Amino acid sequence: MMNDEQLLRYSRQIMLPSIGIEGQERLLQSRVLIIGLGGLGSPAALYLAAAGVGRLTLVDFDRVDLSNLQRQIIHRNDHIGMAKVESARMALQGINPDCRIHPIDHALEGDELEQEVARADLVIDGSDNFTTRFAVNDACVATRTPLVSGAAIRMEGQVAVFSGRPGDPCYRCLYGGGAELDETCSANGVLAPLVGIIGSIQALEAIKVLTGAGEPLIGRLLLLDALQMEWRTLRLKADPACPVCAGRSPQ
């Protein structure tokens, strides 16, 4: 049961019919794994902590650099040189001290990745390369853990939700194994508010999945052309030849 301070802190969410007391309690009991504390992971983590997600596991092996501060809003100038997970932990606990933070300052791979995904109720992928995205997706499929995937480059962004359930598409259904060329912000640039928009949508979709509110972007890819400020939605289907999710048993 929530105490009086929590009732006041989350009162504006509790007022929403789609959230209510029950939805807020679900958030407080939830564990979210966030891969990457960069441009996408920063706003996603801030909003999830503020919204009352009870436990956040933060994964990033990098350190704060001056070039990060243009868009990675969870970090501060006086945190340059600090591990990103520690910088993020300090910011999040300053917003909501009740949120329990578990920082992991190295890349997750293999069994360790799958174990952390299995512990989570939902995963947010804020990474910037296909190798990590594929590995996270594969672990989510194996453990049937919902995945909220985001990407942003230059003036374009995208968000999708993958349920992890048999019969629904996974990230590999969208990109297969043919995505060989990674495009990074350091090589192509990105406008600061764009990653804020995409990361915030990731947090919103995560809250919807965790609380059961509304219709998450499962089976849909949301695309943003920020230069023209145009949104498009594409329907996604499971690939019957997908090397990861095809032929999975519902049990």
Image (cartoon, grey):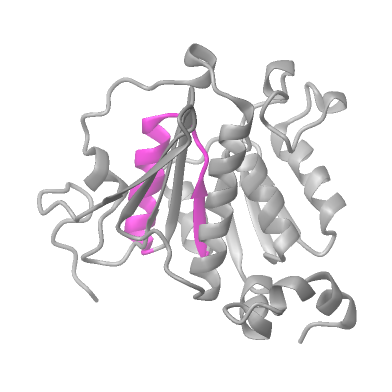
Q: Is residue 125 magenta?
A: yes
Residue drawn at 73 percent across, 31 percent down: 83
Which residue ends up furthest to the top in the rendered image?
Answer: 187
Could one spot residue 206 in this view of the protein? yes
Is 182 placed above or below 194 here?
above
The residue lying toward the viewer, choosing from 156 and 73, is 156
The residue lying toward the viewer, choosing from 226 and 122, is 226
Task: Give the position of the N terminus as an image quadrant.
Answer: bottom right
Task: Give the position of the C terminus as an image quadrant.
Answer: bottom left
Q: Is residue 67 magenta?
A: no
Q: Is residue 191 left or right of residue 179?
A: right
Residue drawn at 70 percent across, 39 percent down: 85
Q: Is residue 109 left or right of residue 207?
A: left
Residue drawn at 30 percent across, 58 percent down: 219
Is 154 placed above or below 104 here?
above
Res 100 → quadrant: bottom right
Q: Is residue 96 left or right of residue 183?
A: right
Q: What is the x, y in percent for residue 152? A: 48, 32
Is 71 placed above or below 7 here?
above
Q: What is the x, y in percent for residue 235? A: 25, 53
Q: What is the x, y in percent for residue 123? A: 50, 54
Res 142 → quadrant: bottom left
Span of residues in magenta: 121-144
Which residue ends up furthest to the left in the rendered image?
Answer: 241
The residue lying toward the viewer, choosing from 198 and 103, is 198
Q: Is residue 247 left or right of residue 212?
A: left
Could one spot residue 39 in this view of the protein? no
The residue lying toward the viewer, choosing from 2 and 199, is 199
Q: How many marks?
A: 0
Is 3 placed above or below 123 here?
below
Q: What is the x, y in percent for residue 67? A: 69, 17
Residue drawn at 73 percent across, 24 percent down: 69
